[in-house]
Image (cartoon, helix red, strand yellow):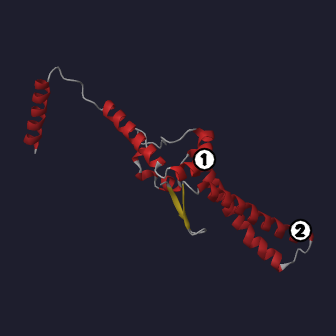
Amino acid sequence: PMFDHYCPYIANTVGGANYAKFVAFIVAGLFGVAAAAAAALQHLLYVKKTSVIGWLMVVVWVPITLMALLMNQYHATLILKNLTTNEDINRHRYAYLRDDHGKFANPFSKGPFGNCMECCRRGGEVTADPYCHSKQHEAIAKAEEKRSRELHAMPPYENDDEALSTNDEKAALYSNNA
């Protein structure tokens, strides 16, 4: 199963099966709070500039609208990068999110358009096979491990006796230094 984050606003975990619905929810929430802020501003501008309730509504709804806008922007960025909230916050913990030089690299990214398409169909994929993303991760991890072994492979020996003597020499060197 694909875990994204626990959301206290909906009191539920958000993941592969319900992430698109969560995004639709926060987009709708943005429109709702923006409409409330616009209505409060409109009331102050066209009805009564000295309305205490109007000013109170502006003071409350404008910052909430800005927070909702930032939340939507953050999740749009995650979708474009094909990351979960968990991966973004804990990217320093996950070796698969770094390249050979230690810089951020997402092996699951399919480009912005491909990532958006995956986000849209992710719910159906996870419903059909809850472990589909785990299988993708395993396949990428195996490919990375194979690539790493090939990069760091020792040159082949002419015969096994040479390999043995070299390993014996290394063992003797380490035991002498210990």
* Number of the front mark, 2 or 1: 1
Q: Residue at x 22, y 24 (%)?
A: 156
Residue topped by disc 2: 45
Where's residue 145, x and y in %? 35, 38
Badge 1 is on which residue? 121
Indicate whether 142 appears above or below 94: above
Quadrant of the image containing the C terminus? top left
- Location of residue 63 (image quadrant): bottom right
Q: Residue at x 87, y 67 (%)?
A: 42
In three-dimensional space, the C-alpha distance between marks 2 and 1, rounded to whole angstroms, equals 44 Å
Residue depicted at 67% across the width and 57% down the height? 24
Callout 2: helix, strand or loop? helix
Residue ranking furthest to the right = 46
Residue 77 vs 31, above or below: the answer is: above
Q: Tell me how many marks there are.
A: 2
As drawn, is 152 to the left or to the right of 47?
Answer: left
Task: Tell me if residue 100 comes above or below residue 159 in the rendering.
Answer: below
Q: Position of residue 147 (x, y in %)?
A: 36, 33
**Amino acid carrying mark 1 in the image:** Arg
As drawn, which residue projects farthest toward the top?
Answer: 158
Q: Residues within 10 Å of mark 1 (few under 14, many from 20)?
A: few
Extreme-bottom residue of the structure:
52
- Percent x, y for residue 16? 54, 54
Q: Position of residue 27 (x, y in %)?
A: 69, 58
